[in-house]
């Protein structure tokens, strides 16, 4: 039933976004759908409606981030499974009608993450900053050995991120990119100050 709910949810969210945001690119629509149907988003729905009280799992770390952590935490998948099973059951009960299922669950899934509220992931922000300033990025992936990700910019170390046990690799990448981004901004400001002093 979870597989049915997962497929129906993906289709409903894709359809909703396609008509709500006709000017968004295919990549942006994909990113938007991803954060609206991922484990963390669905775990939040389960917690919001107290579905987690029927499990032995705790509320986990999802409450630390009010909207979405974008890969920084790893909530229990069982919380997302509950929501998917519920959606699947409603879909079957509604004679497999996507529109009727959407009407039944859309309030439960609110608030949907919109393009305006979608936080730019640290990795994307970091890459865009480096591209804008013609800086070469190198990623050193030590995840398998030390659970660390490092970024070098133009051959110089700029930031490291480490994930604690239970966190995803994405969390380490985001932390590393966030640290590197701050370092790049600091370096660019210092360079601008030096250039201004010399002119």
Image (cartoon, helix red, strand yellow):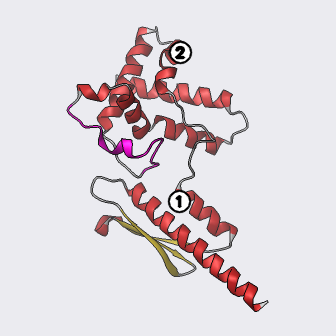
Position of 83 relative to 128 (above/below): above
Most distant residue in the bottom direction: 198
Q: CA distance from mark 1 to mark 2?
A: 36 Å
Instruction: Decide which of 64, 165 is in the foreground and name it.
Output: 64
Q: Residue 189 falls in which quadrant of the image?
A: bottom right
Identified at 44% across, 37% down, the residue is 41
Disc 2 element: helix
Instruction: Decide which of 63, 14 is in the foreground and name it.
Output: 63
CB of mark 1 within 8 Å of CB of mark 2? no
Q: Residue 43 falls in which quadrant of the image?
A: top left
Q: Position of residue 21 (x, y in %)?
A: 68, 33
Position of the C terminus by quadrant: bottom right
Is 113 on the left or on the right of 192, as rendered? left
Q: Position of residue 168 (x, y in %)?
A: 36, 53
The earlier-in-sequence mark between 1 and 2 is 2
Residue that badge 2 annotates: 103
Mark 1 residue crowding within 10 angstroms, few (<14) / some (14–19) / many (20+): some
Residue that badge 1 annotates: 123
Position of 167 relative to 184 (above/below): above
Q: Residue 183 falls in which quadrant of the image?
A: bottom right
Q: Position of residue 131 (x, y in %)?
A: 66, 67
Is 169 on the left or on the right of 53, as rendered? right
Most distant residue in the right direction: 199
Is 48 on the left or on the right of 26, as rendered? left
Is 54 on the left or on the right of 123, as rendered? left
Residue range of the region highlighted in magenta in the rendering: 56-71
**Magenta residue check for 13:** no
Position of the N terminus by quadrant: top left
Mark 2 residue crowding within 10 angstroms, few (<14) / some (14–19) / many (20+): few
Majority SS type along the magenta span? loop
């Amino acid at each position: 039933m979870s597989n049915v709910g997962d497929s129906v949810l993906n289709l409903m969210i894709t359809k909703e976004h396609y008509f709500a945001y006709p000017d968004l690119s295919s990549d942006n629509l994909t990113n938007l759908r991803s954060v609206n149907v991922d484990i963390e988003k669905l775990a939040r729905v389960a917690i919001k409606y107290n579905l987690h009280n029927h499990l032995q799992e705790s509320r986990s770390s999802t409450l630390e981030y009010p909207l979405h952590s974008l890969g920084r935490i790893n909530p229990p998948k069982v919380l997302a499974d509950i929501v998917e099973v519920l959606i699947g059951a409603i879909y079957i009960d509604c004679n497999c009608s996507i529109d009727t299922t959407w009407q039944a669950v859309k309030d439960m899934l609110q608030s949907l993450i919109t393009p305006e509220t979608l936080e730019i992931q640290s990795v994307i922000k970091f890459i865009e900053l480096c591209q804008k300033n013609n800086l070469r990025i190198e990623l050193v992936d030590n995840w398998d050995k030390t659970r660390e990700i490092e970024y070098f910019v133009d051959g110089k170390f700029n930031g490291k991120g480490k994930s604690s046990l239970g966190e995803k690799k994405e969390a380490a990448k985001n932390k590393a990119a966030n640290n590197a981004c701050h370092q790049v901004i600091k370096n660019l400001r210092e360079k601008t100050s030096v250039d201004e002093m010399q002119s």
